[in-house]
Amino acid sequence: MDLAVEQLLKLIEKRTELHLACVFTCPGPKKRRSDAYLKVVRVVPSNIDVIVCNRKKTFLEKIKLYKPDLLLSIGYPWLLPEDLLKFPPLGALNFHNSHLPDKVGPNAFGVALINGDDNFKFCSHRMDGTFDTGAIMWKETMPIAIDDYLDDESFWTTKLAPVIFRMLEKSIDLAIAGEPGTPQVGKPTHAALFDESFRWIDWTEPALKIHNKVRSFFGHRDIPHGAFAKIEDEGHIRITRTIPCSSPDKTKTPTDSGHTPDVIETDKKRPKLSSPGAVISRNHEDNTFIILCGDKPLKVLKWDKVLS
């Protein structure tokens, strides 16, 4: 993750006793191949070695050349060999986007959104040769706003970057102090990648649930971008931005980013003539529309047609 490398470089600039020995990155396993590693390569200064390697059997021999005291893994797609984890004197730490053992796996952000969680959660933990099972070192929590989208650059640079910086500093200090961490307690829950069929919207569901489904497909690495739907006059479309409409009896309240949800006035004396999935208004100037869901309307802010 390039943002994590940037925050680590800021931490090293602040803490001159720390030194970044090298950076390992890779395209990832065949089923989860990604070009995200290119962003990592671009942000690393020219005086620091970057090793791009997909052959796990050669990791240890390469790492030994740099004699690191501590290994940090952030968004790395491979399960690292135990002999590699045991090589650094201070051990190896992984950073995960949940409070383990909740949401083990590669899709913790998506599951948090689908579940309607109030917060994104993060932790660092010691690595022990299996995925997401080691002792917990540090935890962080960040509130989820109604208009948080993980494909927004500002979400990462403004909201998430300070969390990553703080986690890196606290976790490294604990490792230097010899903190073993706290064993995970409880039964794991899993955050597997969503099945492709899950991307399709059912307009009979509540507006907030549909909104969360749209933003759970945020287009990073092996997560596809946008949810699919069928609407009148347009056929199949891909939706990448929505916002639930407010109830007519509530005062408009701006969200964290300043967006004010639309208030839809309805005449309660008139019988309902529209069913879920009906487009009840359009704005041809900005190409947005408001569509009826199972409980209330939803404003679709960004969408495009699905090519057949």
Image (cartoon, helix red, strand yellow):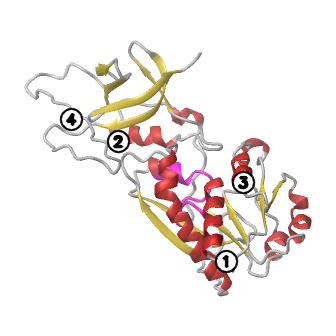
**Would you name the residue on which mark 3 appears?**
77
**Residue type beneath disc 3:** Pro
Mark 4 vs 2, N-terminal side = 2
Q: Is residue 214 magenta?
A: no
Which numbered tag is attached to residue 263?
A: 4
Name the residue located 88 percent from the left edge and 67 percent from the top edge. 60
- The image shows residue 290 at horizontal and vertical percentages of 31, 26
Q: Please state, as top left, top right, bottom left or bottom right, where the N terminus lies in the image.
A: bottom right
**Residue type beneath disc 2:** Leu
At mark 3, the secondary structure is loop
10 Å crowding of disc 3: few (<14), some (14-19), many (20+):
some
Closer to the camera in the image, 23 or 269: 23
The Cα–Cα distance between marks 4 and 1, rounded to whole angstroms, is 53 Å
Name the residue located 56 percent from the left edge and 36 percent from the top edge. 225
Name the residue located 53 percent from the left edge and 70 percent from the top edge. 166
- Residue 54, relative to residue 271: is it above or below? below
- The image shows residue 211 at horizontal and vertical percentages of 39, 39
- The image shows residue 191 at horizontal and vertical percentages of 57, 53
Mark 2 vs 1, N-terminal side = 1
**Would you name the residue on which mark 2 appears?**
208
Q: Which residues are magenta?
A: 96-112
Comparing labels 2 and 3, the label whose residue is closer to the camera: 3
Comparing labels 3 and 1, the label whose residue is closer to the camera: 1
**Would you name the residue on which mark 1 appears?**
16
